[in-house]
Image (spheres, grey):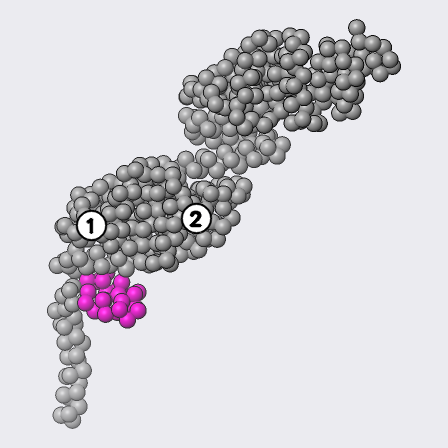
Amino acid sequence: MKRLSWLMVLALAAPVAVQKALAQTGPDDIAKQAEEKAAAGDVDGAIELLRRAAGMPNASGEISLKLGRLLEGRLQLDAAIAAFQAASDKLSGALKGEALGRMSIAQEMRGMPQAAATADAALQAEPAGAWPLTAAARARARQGKGAEAVPLAEKAVAAGGGAAAQAALGYAQEARGDLAAAEAAYRGALTSDAGSAIASIGVARVLRKTKRASAAEPLMQQVLAKVPGSADAHKEMARIKLALGRFDDAVAESATAAALSDGDADAQQLVQEASLAKALAQVAAGQAELAIPELQAARDRSPDSLSIRLGLAKALIAGRQADAAVAELQKAAELDPRNAETQNQLGYVNLFLRRNAAAAAAAYEKAVAAAPANTDYRTALGVALNAAKQYDRAIPELLKVTQTPGYAKADAWIALGEALVVLRRYPDAVPVLEKGASLAPKNAQAAAYLAWTYFGLKDAANFKKAGAKARALGYKEPTLLDYLSRVEAGQPIK
């Protein structure tokens, strides 16, 4: 009976002893146990222990940093950001710089605009640290400052930053415009860390930019399977879908990115870009009636968006709603008076829908002034000047186009030929229209202009040849066809 009583006492006392022992276990001891679990492969167990240790009143910032590293490796971005923030609040020097640098990169993936400020704080805490340099390089690259980003990334690599630094070097090279070097750096990062999400996103982005979007898509699918909460990954997938012409998917991905991000202006802009691309695809497919209400709704949500105003105007033009299109284009011109495409579309509406050649020429002149190297705009100006019967002004504009190295379209050659024919400069018109007809062998108007040129030169053989070709191509203008019938019947050209 005595023995049984002692056993009962021991049994009752054991939990108290265990609880007391646990209470006396400090955060450092628990952190040590966590390290042992992590080393044995039990990362989830290690995270749980570190969470318990970090929550203790006397826990050091280094414990939160260790927790953040493990959460980062698990791609649990929000939890990692919170851990790094807690660590940076308690740490100083190199460890503070590491916590802030890692936090900046996680914030970037989450689409948080404060990532750049966090990177600057990291660099202030430890200017020579691998993680602060890595974060700062990424921040500069994201701002388009490739020349500043590259040396920072190179220092990060030299400081032993590993895959993250190598990926930052890729981002920096990408910002500098060297896509081949960027891809090599990203792939180097993946060689040392096959699971690097930021390196995988970088490779996918380069593949898309180098017209290999179909190869980028499966890579991004793998990233999103591992880190579905990354706004950065969803943004890249949306851009890949756009490149592949899958506009509904692009709209969905961009909306997800915007929902996940915290005030990321780029994500919001991408939503507009995807919606606009979808609407313009509908216009191109002859479904302007579907695109117009969607674009009107988008315009009402973002009345100061130039791209949406322009997109809506193009849809209205396709729907032959000239007045409504002009209203949108005039508002677009107010938003950006120097936007060349706005003036180009105004020229188109006036020339082809309103039949106002003078107003069209005035708009096209503004387009050319804003983008003087654009041969399409200058060709349209020449066409409008022809329509306004200002042939002497049209000829020098069209000559600038035809004399542009590499120009291989028929439009400017045919419009130039028209002006020369009207001004009865027939010898000059022959080689011009022959060139235009060779570039557009099925263009009935080019053949007709050429026929009139030979008629003016009284070259009956070539007139019959060019005229017969125009007729075979469906040319219906009765005056030319009447003269052709007479000459074919044997009458001389007088």
Tell me where the magenta segment starts and ends, as one range: 31-53
Using the image, tell me which numbered label, if any, was put on residue 204. Answer: 2
* Figure check: 194 above or below 456: below
Who is closer to the viewer here, 35 or 401? 401
Measured as percent of width and height from the top left, residue 238 is found at 46, 43
Using the image, tell me which numbered label, if any, was put on residue 258. Answer: none
Mark 2 surroundings: few (<14), some (14-19) or many (≥20) residues within 10 A:
many
* Figure check: 443 above or below 99: above
Image position of 427 (left or right of 397):
right
Is residue 104 visible in the rendered image? The answer is no
- Residue visible at 16% across and 55% down? 61
Residue 49, by quadrant, is bottom left
* Figure check: 181 above or below 370: below
Q: What's the distance in space between the residues labelled 1 and 2, CA to CA?
A: 28 Å
- Residue visible at 38% across and 41% down? 178
- Residue visible at 54% across and 13% down? 396
